[in-house]
């Protein structure tokens, strides 16, 4: 996984019947913040989406890739200072060739990401 | 068009700077290029992750916004954030060394939110397309 132990650290996970709840810690020393943005660390929205992909892969036990993003709203600015720990909730239902994934990223204060898209399984 | 260094046009830096050049601008349309680099943050085993294509499209739009801001007299490019992604399709992920050519079409701007669409190609092959809203916090 691209961002595991690089951009975030998994604290805990609960998986049941196509539904997963993942608690993660953002890593403030991640190199991505050197460039996004210099002196102003902000979580890249695309890293949040990749985080959802990795949690969906854990949930389904498959190595998933993103085929479509039907809609993804980034509703609040996230950073390791604003939200050091986050909860990623993922719902995956089987669809043609893969899964329809609905997910959100939030903490106690607010929601940061709302995602809906299709992911398929990578060939081995 | 006059050549302007990319660091004057976009605020993103290594390891997540993902446009090399703003190739041309025609009012609300622009074309950019980017050679996929091994040191990029979103490279997984020599392949750019799907979200790397989204980031590249967002930064291509950022380059056009930066170009316009510079022409209007700004000294720094605006910092835009992705607010929404809609109808993104990834047909193929590029490998390190491939050169992406991307066209951006900017739409209306309302209260700091700009609508745009983008298409990424390697030569004639379409790799990804999407619609997006970029938000510039004031």
Image (cartoon, helix red, strand yellow):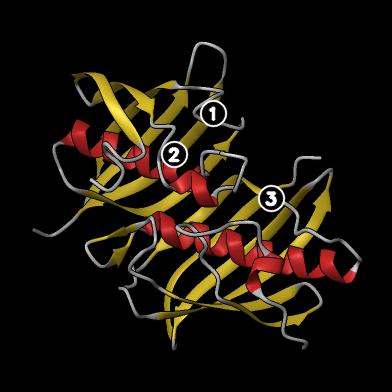
| Label 2: chain letter | A
Give residue A78's position: percent from left, percent from top. 55, 31
Q: Find residue A48 and name its label.
A: 2
The reply to whether the C-beta atoms of the residues labelled 1 and 2 are less than 8 Å apart is: yes
Classify B11 as above or below A18: below
Residue A71 shows in the view: no
Placement of the C terminus of chain A among the 4 image quadrants: bottom left
Label 2: few (<14), some or many (≥20) within 10 Å? many
Q: Is residue A55 visible?
A: yes
Instruction: Say which element carries label 2.
Output: helix
The answer to whether B98 appears left or right of B110 in the picture is: left
Estimate how packed mark 1 is, as few (under 14), some (14 to 19) or many (20 or more) residues with alpha carbons within 10 Å.
some
How crowded pointer 3 is (Cα within 10 Å; few <14, some 14-19, many 20+) is rated as many
C-alpha span from label 3 to label 1? 16 Å
Q: Which residue is mark 1?
A: A112
Residue A42 image-quadrant placement:
top right
Q: Quadrant of residue B125?
A: bottom left
């Amino acid at each position: 996984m691209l961002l595991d132990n690089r951009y975030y650290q998994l604290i805990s996970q609960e998986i049941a019947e196509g539904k997963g709840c993942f608690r993660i810690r953002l890593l403030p020393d991640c190199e991505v913040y050197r460039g996004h943005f210099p002196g102003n660390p902000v979580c890249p929205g695309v890293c949040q989406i990749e985080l959802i992909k990795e949690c969906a892969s854990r949930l389904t036990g498959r190595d998933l890739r993103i085929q479509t993003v039907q809609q993804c709203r980034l509703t609040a600015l996230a950073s390791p200072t604003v939200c050091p720990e986050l909860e990623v909730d993922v719902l995956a239902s089987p669809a043609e060739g893969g899964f329809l994934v609905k997910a959100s990223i939030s903490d106690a204060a607010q929601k940061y990401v709302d995602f809906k898209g299709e992911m398929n399984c990578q060939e081995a | 068009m006059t050549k302007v260094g990319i660091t004057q046009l976009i605020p993103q830096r290594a390891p997540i700077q993902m446009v090399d050049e703003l190739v041309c601008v025609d009012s609300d349309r622009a074309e950019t290029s980017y050679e996929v680099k091994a040191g990029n943050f979103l490279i997984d085993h020599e392949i750019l992750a799907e979200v790397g294509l989204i980031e590249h499209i967002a930064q291509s739009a950022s380059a056009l916004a930066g170009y316009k801001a510079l022409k209007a007299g700004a000294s720094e490019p605006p910092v835009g954030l992705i607010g929404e992604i809609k109808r993104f399709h990834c047909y193929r992920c590029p490998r390190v060394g491939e050169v992406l050519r991307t066209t951006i079409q900017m739409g209306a701007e309302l209260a700091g939110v700009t609508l745009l669409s983008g298409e990424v190609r390697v030569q004639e092959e379409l790799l990804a397309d999407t619609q997006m809203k970029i938000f510039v916090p004031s």
